[in-house]
Image (cartoon, helix red, strand yellow):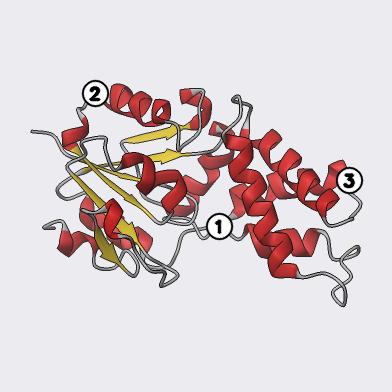
Amino acid sequence: MREIVTFDAYGTLVDFQLGPTTLKVLEDRLDLDNLDVDEFLDDFRVMRFQAVLEAYRPYHEVLHSSLRNAMRLHGLEYRTSDGDALVEAVPTFGPFPEVPDALRALKTRYEIAIISNTDDNLIARNVENIGVEFDHVITAQQAGAYKPDRQTFEHAFKTMGVEPSQVIHTAQGWEYDHIPTRDLGLKRRVWINRFGRPGSADYQPYDELRDMTGLPKLLGC
């Protein structure tokens, strides 16, 4: 029976440096004496999650609207060029150091695939930066929906031609990946806990790793 290891991309495979990039883009307007940077970036994260729960629109529009809303919340001037700069930065992000070798080891036994909340043209270069060929790269643009919507995962299973029981899903994020996949009947789920956060017994079973270094051994490669 075919088995596929699927991955979230940003934050799992790709070092998603959106926070530092945002601060750099806005450095001419950030009053660091009066702005709680961590709170601002957290609000920006929340705005992005809220946006993907709404009717589908391309990810570059999600970035624009989420940044605009977060800036307005904190009394900052938004410029269209701010969102443009973030969109242009996303394809430049590369993989976490251990990712390419881990993926190459997995490919000796499994098909590998990406299921990502992004646009096709944005992730294409991220995949090139990883330097490993994937059997499938499935995006929200293709699915017409964003994770955590089940439509995204169901589209992925159909596209790959597999049942959920043939899929091992690997991801760092809870709200986008591990919560919605708990009851999908997947073969296995792996949490890449890059930030040392506490897990949750309510969403077991899942395996937990600090990064992807130990993933090939965990999966028998």
The reply to whether discs 3 and 1 touch (Cβ–Cβ < 8 Å) is: no
Instruction: Give the residue displayed 85% in from the left and 45% down from the top.
Output: 81
Label 2 neighbourhood size at 10 Å, few (<14), some (14-19), many (20+)? Answer: few
Residue 160 figure quarter: top left
Label 1 neighbourhood size at 10 Å, few (<14), some (14-19), many (20+)? Answer: many
Residue 58 figure quarter: top right
Question: Dot 2: what SS?
Answer: loop
- Most foreground residue, 81 or 183: 183
Quadrant of the snapshot with the C terminus = bottom left
- Most foreground residue, 132 or 158: 158
Quadrant of the snapshot with the N terminus = top left
Q: Is residue 1 left or right of residue 35?
A: left
Q: Residue furthest left?
A: 1
Residue 184 figure quarter: top left
Mark 3 or mark 1, which has the lower sequence index?
1
Q: Is residue 170 left or right of residue 147?
A: left
Q: Position of residue 5 (x, y in %)?
A: 25, 45
Residue wearing tag 2: 161
Question: Dot 3: what SS?
Answer: loop
- The kind of residue tagged 3 is Arg
Question: From mark 1 to mark 2, how far is it between C-alphas?
Answer: 29 Å
Residue wearing tag 1: 16
Residue wearing tag 3: 79
Instruction: Give the residue displayed 84% in from the left and 66% down from the top.
Output: 27
- The kind of residue tagged 2 is Gly
